[in-house]
Image (cartoon, rainbow, N blue to C red):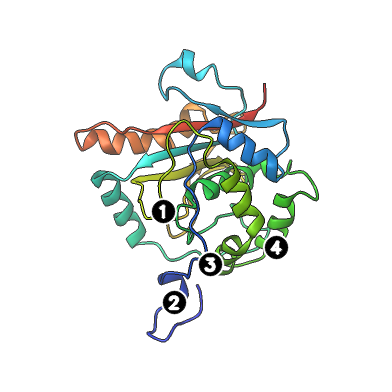
Amino acid sequence: MGETGDKGVTLSEVPHECAKTFTMLENNPDVMNELAHSIGVPKELSFHDVYSLYDSDMLAMVPRPVFALLTTIPMTEAWKQERDTEDADLEWYKGAGPAEPAIWFRQTIIHGCGLIGLLHCVCNGVPSELIVPGSELANFLRKAVPLGMDERARLLNETESMYQASEAVAQKGDTEALKPGEDSIHHFVALVKGLDGNLWELEGSRKGPLNRGSLDENEDALSERALELGVRRLVDIQRMAGGDLAFSCTALAPSV
């Protein structure tokens, strides 16, 4: 955990000064691919639309294996209650270094959730081994991985090249970008198959990375088990509360 502040709370429990406000990204393959490839994700990997979590024909349209899912989910009351209950029993993340099973970034940047969601997808699992050597992303990770939660968040906040790369694609989605001062009810959540074989739920506004369970060697992030452990579980939370969950989903997989 971070250092102790003047009022006896850790730095990880109080807001960080945020030097920038990002333009929120759209969870759109064109946007995410341009950003990913510009910072050092190889062209052999791309984000693809996922049109259904249940229809086998639509799921078959996604190239395999899928290394990660990137979803945007509205903060419904049912999901908020589930999150608050789970987080109440968790401590703030204390991990650091290359031995950690998942690389996680705490969000302290206003509207930086899209960039952080992308980083969670490409910096974990198989994609992390394919990052272009000497690229902006490779150089950033070399600095970020050894750091603790607070220092890693501060590094991302202060890395001007990441800000510029994100801003360069922010206006290229199908919907109008949020104006300064506007809030979004949607959260970017990444569901990634780690190199340890576990499905990791990664979101910058939680207390740390969340291990949702193990996957077999032949199960990817879009497998039936991964869907049940991950995004379908979130849909079911809302359905049990008597409503539907409107969300978007893209998959990081081989390019076609």
Q: Nearer the viewer, mark 1 or mark 4?
A: 1
- Up/down of 163 relative to 48, above or below: below
| Mark earlier in primary sequence (4, 3) | 3
Badge 4 local density, few (<14 within 10 Å), some, or many (20+)? few
Q: Secondary structure at mark 1?
A: loop
> How many labels were placed on the picture?
4
Q: Position of residue 141 (x, y in %)?
A: 69, 56
| Mark earlier in primary sequence (1, 4) | 4
**CA gap, disc 4 and disc 3:** 17 Å
Q: Amino acid at mark 4?
A: Lys
Badge 3 local density, few (<14 within 10 Å), some, or many (20+)? few
Q: Is residue 20 left or right of residue 138?
A: left
Q: Which residue is mark 1?
A: 180
Corner quadrant of residue 168: top right
Q: Which residue is mark 3?
A: 94
**CA gap, disc 1 and disc 3:** 32 Å
The one nearer the camera, 17 or 64, is: 17
Q: Amino acid at mark 1?
A: Pro
Q: Are marks 1 and 4 in contact (CB under 8 Å)?
A: no
| Mark earlier in primary sequence (4, 2) | 2
Q: Nearer the viewer, mark 2 or mark 3?
A: 2
**CA gap, disc 1 and disc 4:** 30 Å
Corner quadrant of residue 219: top right
